[in-house]
Image (cartoon, helix red, strand yellow):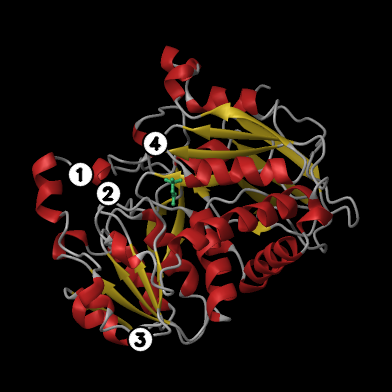
Amino acid sequence: MRKNEQKPFQSPYTHKKSGKIWLPKNYINFSKEKNRFILIIPQEFVTIEWNKNESCGFMENKNLIDLEAMSVEQLAKIVKKAKKIMQSPADYRHACDGKILATLFYEPSTRTQMSFQTAMLKLGGRTIGFDNPMNSSVSKGENLKDTISVISGYADIIAIRHPTEGTAMAASLYSEVPLINCGDGGHLHPTQTLTDIVTLSCEKGRLDHLKIGVCGDLLNGRTVHSLIKTLAKYEGNSFVLVSTPELCVPLYIIDILEKNGCAYEISNSLADAVTDLDVLYMTRIQRERFKSEEDYQAQKNVFVLDREKLDRAPQDMIILHPLPRVNEITVDIDDDPRALYFKQAQYGMFGRMALILLLLQDEDFLIPARETQVCDLRCNNPKCITRHEAYLPNLSYEKLGMRMCEYCDKRID
Ligand code: CP
């Protein structure tokens, strides 16, 4: 379509009951003119009729990029649905008959990929996808936009993992179907956090008033970023951040803790931290995110949970780990009743079943999106997808008076 040309608006996302329209994220911006919204799409303008007095669903969508936008009520809805599925899985055996999930894994995975595939199969649906992009046309140079545009014509829902930050958000611009972030570089991993909150709810009976120790690679560990951002929404949660100075959490995560009024301590001693926790969340040192092997060698094995340290911990403290484990928890701890990391991986499958169902079948389950603007500045984070896919529009949002990259959440001004 030529620029400024107008076409009648036909959204596949019209809410069937209320007539309210929600839009895929590629409708990235709009401005009001009389009772029309001008939706600004990369290289396109679309105008639709809209009554100014009606509530507007433009900033909502069906893409799970980051749990930050999700309300506590929506998170509770996922947890509740996951528990219902656990209680009576047979009731959901045909819930997604005829539906197809595409798993596009540009980066290795055991749990996330297979639990999504199992989730869809247990719901009666089917799966397509790749776990090695070199076996797809990505190896011939196909860009992200083209891959997503094509796959979203085949599948009803897409789950994507990629080594570059902001890729899921970028992919959502070109997807016509709900798209789920299964990890984008060292940035975010929202469905791991769903796994974690389903586990916490089932095993601790609450998501609030918890003292959570997170230990390991807090800089590159995307699971940690998503977890802290989400648990910071709940009242009374506090955090002990155990890492080396080189691998401490990014500043934007500290900003979130402070903005939410969460107490936090920074510690360099796992032995000290472990004495007074409800939850210990161990993480792997992310070898693949280091600039050199030498840098990785200096960090590996600094924090190891062994029997001696665990003996200092409360009896009701639970140990979680997103897995894979390398050396950070000794194997002899696996039989301790506090070690729940394998059970956690199973909870994840139920959380993902719940998510698929809500995204595909619950018209009211819409995820609010940030108010995004097209801007002149290009993000200069070398790990951001915008550095690799030249056609992507420069998108930003405002936070605490600063302009942030819509894709990777790094400051751009
Ligand atoms: N926790 C997690 O993301 O594991 P995988 O990398 O195996 O998917």
Mark 2 surroundings: few (<14), some (14-19) or many (≥20) residues within 10 A: some
Mark toward the viewer: 1 or 3: 3
How far is disc 1 from disc 3 in space, using C-alphas? 34 Å
Answer above or below: position of 100 versus 398.
above
The reply to whether residue 187 is visible in this rendering is yes
Q: Considering the numbered disc 1 on the image, is that residue within a helix, a strand or a loop?
A: loop
- Residue kind at label 1, given as amino acid type: Phe
Separation of marks 3 and 4 at Cα, in angstroms? 46 Å
Could you tell me how far apart the alpha carbons at marks 4 and 1 are, in whole angstroms? 20 Å
Query: Is residue 69 depicted above or below 206 in this figure?
Result: above
Q: Residue at x 35, y 83 (%)?
A: 277
What percent of the width, then of the height, locates residue 373?
Answer: 51, 49
Would you say 297 lies left or right of 46 here? left
Mark number displayed over residue 286: 2
| Residue marked by disc 3 | 314
Q: Check disc 4 and report the residue beneath it.
A: 386
What's the distance in space between the residues labelled 2 and 1, CA to CA? 7 Å
User: Residue 16: x, y in percent?
Assistant: 89, 50
Q: Position of residue 167 (x, y in %)?
A: 46, 39
Q: Residues within 10 Å of mark 1 (few under 14, many from 20)?
A: few
Q: In the rendered image, which residue does mark 1 sit on?
A: 290
Indicate the secondary structure of the residue bearing disc 4: helix
The one nearer the camera, 18 or 281, is 281
User: Mark 2 or mark 4, which has the lower sequence index?
Assistant: 2
Q: Amino acid at mark 4?
A: Thr
Asked if marks 2 and 1 touch (Cβ < 8 Å), the reply is: yes
- Going by the numbered disc 3, the residue's amino acid type is Pro
| Mark 2 or 1: the one toward you | 2
Using the image as rendered, state which of residue 279 and residue 339 is in the foreground: 339
Q: Callout 2, which amino acid?
A: Gln
